[in-house]
Image (tube, rainbow, N blue to C red):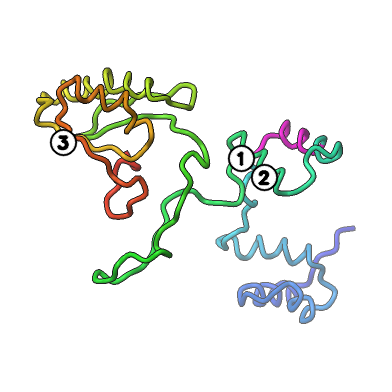
Amino acid sequence: MVYTLSRSKQESIRSLLKKGLSYSESMKRVPGVSRSTLSKYKDLYTPERTRGHAGRKTTISSTTKNYLKRELVNGSLKTAKGVWSYLNSIGHKIGYFDGCKYFWKRPSDKLQPHHLDLTVKGGAGSVLLWGCMTWDGPGYGCAIENGTMKASDYVHILSTTLMDSLKYYGYELKAIYFQQDNDPKHTSKLARAWFKKNGFKEEHTFSWPAQSPDLNPIEHL
């Protein structure tokens, strides 16, 4: 036998739910009504309400989860830091944000140490793409397939991707002002010899601090 609430109880429930009272408070004011019953009537009387959604989806696969369980049981991964390091090594960012960061300062204020987020060269990740940009627009890009680049690889990119970009825009080498950061490959003897051999003026080839907050658009290329 299906139990049906009286019309007066239904109206009371409707009034309480419309006012936004909690289930606990509503149950006190309408005795004999369960939480599940209130939930059903809430769906009936307030269909327009904002509903809760599931939490953020997991970033690791079931295979990775099973592997972590085995390693924790076997003792290979003994701490949360060990799990964090492993997940980051396979490309999962856990518990931190590596995008842009901002700070407030008055236009007349000088940069202070706490305005800078210092990093260690080669401390996390690797260069996957080389790109360049000009006054007239972006140049060609080059993928770094193995995730690392040596001085000889950089010179090869200069000989192909950079030169193709300059040719595309019709630039003369002697009129080029070429700017790069202080990466050791960029300032190597091999790279300096290449610039000299290919007609780049030494005074037109200069470096820019890699973490400078004043002007570092190449990071967003």
Distance, label 1 to label 2, CA atoms, is 6 Å
Please tell me which of labels 3 and 2 falls first in the chain.
Answer: 2
User: In the rendering, which numbered label is found on residue 84?
Assistant: 2
Q: Where residue 1 appears, x then y in whole percent?
A: 90, 58
Where is residue 168 shown, x and y percent of the image? Answer: 16, 22
70 left or right of 214 in image:
right
Query: Would you say the magenta stretch is mainly helix, strand or loop?
Result: helix
Q: Are marks 3 and 1 in contact (CB under 8 Å)?
A: no
> Is the C-beta separation of discs 1 and 2 under 8 Å?
yes
Query: Disc 3 residue type?
Result: His
* Secondary structure beneath label 1: helix
Say whether residue 203 is left or right of residue 142: left
Q: Which residue is mark 1?
A: 88
Label 3 to label 1, Cα distance in Å?
Answer: 40 Å
Location of residue 97 with respect to 144 vertically, above or below: below
Residue 58: x %, y % from top left = 65, 43
- Residue, disc 3: 204
Q: Local crowd at mark 1 within 10 Å, few (<14), some, or many (≥20)?
A: some
Q: Which residues are magenta?
A: 59-69
Tell me the CA gap for discs 3 and 2: 45 Å
- Answer left or right for 98 relative to 28: left
The amino acid type of the residue labelled 1 equals Asn
